[in-house]
Image: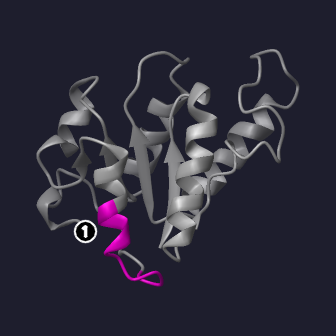
Amino acid sequence: MKFYLCSPTAMAKDMESFRLAIESCGHAVMSRWHSGNIGNPRLELTDPQIFQRAVDDIRDIENSDVLIAFAASGGRGGRHYEMGYAYGAGLTVWMVGQMEHAFHSLHYNSGTQFDSWTECLKRIETLPPHQRIKKNPGYLHSSPKTQI
């Protein structure tokens, strides 16, 4: 399965640790923003590379099966855009942490919300590595309880 990790850029080091845990289960992590391999995870809005970074992040989301969104305070809000984009594109979206706004309620009682990273990782460990998920048509078109 292919995952995209979505969080404030201040959590980039945590995301790298989580990437290693996911990969040790035989799955792939498609998000690159946290790796450091493509530069500083947090670009200033005036940085000439910011447009390309946004395009690359969208491509990484489109190449994923599941976006894991980490609730946290702070940041500029890019993670909220990524979560909405993934949801609209039909990806399964998992939520780690407590609700921050109304749209998180779409996942809160659906089996796709986890109180902690440890709880989320336990779920990942049960999934066959090469399993692919069919696209989710969205909350209004199917019950979120039917997601993995």
Q: Is residue 64 left or right of residue 42?
A: left
**119 or 72: nearer the viewer:** 119
Report the residue at 61% width, 60% height from top: 30
Question: Camera-side residue: 109 or 143?
Answer: 109
Q: Give coordinates of residue 118: x percent, y percent.
A: 34, 51
Badge 1 crowding class, 10 Å Cα cut-off, few under 14, some 14 to 19, many 20 or more, is: some
Q: Amino acid at mark 1?
A: Ile
Q: Is residue 109 above or below residue 130?
A: above
Label 1, secondary structure: give it. loop
Colour scheme in the image? one colour
**How many marks overall?**
1
Task: Locate residue 33 relative to residue 72 in the image: left or right.
Answer: right
Residue 129 on the magenta span: yes
Give the side of residue 55 with respect to residue 89, left or right: right
Please, is residue 129 above or below residue 10 in the view? below
Give percent across and percent down for residue 136: 30, 63
Residue 22 makes an appearance in the image = yes
Quadrant of the image for the C terminus? bottom left
Compared across the picture, whether 57 is left or right of 97 comes to: right
Q: Residue furthest right?
A: 48
* Predominant SS along the magenta part: loop
Boundaries of the magenta span: 122-131
The residue located at (53%, 77%) in the rendering is 26
Identify the residue under disc 1: 148
Asked whether the viewer can see residue 143, the reply is: no
